[in-house]
Structure formats: structure tokens, C-alpha cells
Image: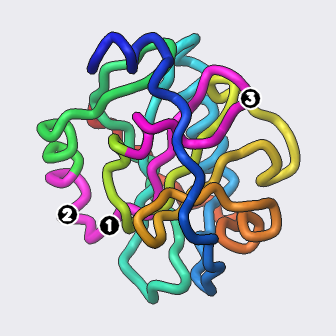
Amino acid sequence: MSDTEDSGEGLFRTAPAVPYEPTTAQLRVPRQALALTLDLFTRAGRREMCSFWYGPASVPELQRVSAVVIPRQRQSWGNYHVTADAMQLIHAQVSPLHLVNFAQVHSHPGARVEHSRYDDRMANSRRALSLVIPHYGGWQGAWPQGIGIHEFQRDYWHLLNGLDAERRVVLTEDTEVRVIDCR
């Protein structure tokens, strides 16, 4: 990581060349998965943190989160970093369970939930969604207001507007969520 990225100067990115195209795909997230994620992030204090939401491979249009995966990571006030070795450790844990990555979730220091250029580069998969939780996980509110939900399309991480975000990621009352801690 460069001094520019650590200082926050690498934050802002250009606007998309083409608009977001809404999809019929839906990610269903148990409220318990969100609560576990928020708790992890707030316990990290004033440092960004990352987790992943995994679930069983299923119909691509309907994905269900069943696990919150916590990677080994380096954390600072303005970013986090998950190494390739840490990702291999996750793969070794989730492969026998036949789980796939549906979303990367990470925290930001303030209310801004747009991806930074650093976030664009560090996203672990362009097939998974990328969610940004404000205030180091101290978010409270009506879902998904104030949460940055990003989807990769046409070579760009699009921040979904409120209606697209509501349709794309839906909270459920499911209670079966496992935590896979790879730290």
C-alpha cells in the first residue's frame, strides 16, 4: 500500500461510463448475518474491517447467505488488506462445505459508502456484491438506507440507488448462520 492510499488521497474515482442495469438476481441475507457482521466491525474499533458472506451454490438469481466468513487481514483507519494466502485459507475452509462467495462486506470510517479506487482494486471477486457499512459498523437504520451496495457491471463497481439496492439485497428472518473465523 502506498502513502497516498493510506493518507486517503486515493479515495475518489470517476463516474461510470455507462449506467447500471438492474438485474433480477437477489441476495437474501438473514438479519443474524447482518447483526454478526455489524458486531465484528464495531468490535474492531476505529479500523476498517472486512468479512465475506457465503452460501450454497444455487440458482444464480436467488442466493442465500448461510455463513459469515472472517478473513485474516491487516486493518487501518482507512482501509483493510486481505492477502492471497488469507484467501486460500478461506477457500480451504469453505470448499468442503460447497459454499460460494456472494458478497464482500467492509466498513468505512464515516458516512461515505461509495467505493474508493482502493476498494475497486481490492475487491476479491467481480462476481460477488460489495457492501460498504458506514461508521466502522456503527450503522443503524432501515435496510438498506445508508449502506453502499455495489455491483460490478461493464467494467465498473456501480453504487446501487435505494430502489435497486432494496431489490438486490433483501433481509430475511432465517436463523441458520454459521461463523467461519479464519483469523
| Residues marked 2 and 3 touching at CB (< 8 Å) | no
Residue hosting label 3:
111
Contact between labelled residues 1 and 2, with CB atoms less than 8 Å apart: yes
- Earlier-in-chain disc, 1 versus 3: 1
Q: Where residue 24 sits in the image (x, y, percent)?
A: 62, 86
Q: Quadrant of residue 76?
A: top left
Q: Does 54 sit left or right of 35 as displayed?
A: left
The kind of residue on which mark 3 rests is: Ala
Mark 1, residue position: 99
**Residue occupied by mark 2:** 95
Check residue 15 in the rendering and tell me which mark sits there, or answer none.
none
Disc 1 to disc 3: CB gap under 8 Å: no
For label 2, the crowd category at 10 Å Cα-Cα, with few meaning under 14, some 14 to 19 and many 20 or more, is: few
Query: How far apart in space, not on screen, are marks 1 and 3 (Cα)?
Result: 31 Å
**Distance in Å between CA atoms under marks 2 and 1:** 6 Å
Characterize the local packing of mark 1: few (<14), some (14-19) or many (20 or more) Cα atoms within 10 angstroms.
Answer: some
**In the displayed structure image, the side of residue 141 where residue 55 appears, left or right:** left
Query: Would you identify the image quadrant in which residue 71 lies?
Result: top left
If the image is split into quadrants, where does the N terminus sit?
A: top left
Q: Judge whether residue 107 is colored magenta.
A: yes
Q: Residue at x 62, y 71 (%)?
A: 20
Element class at badge 2: helix
Q: Is residue 23 left or right of residue 6?
A: right
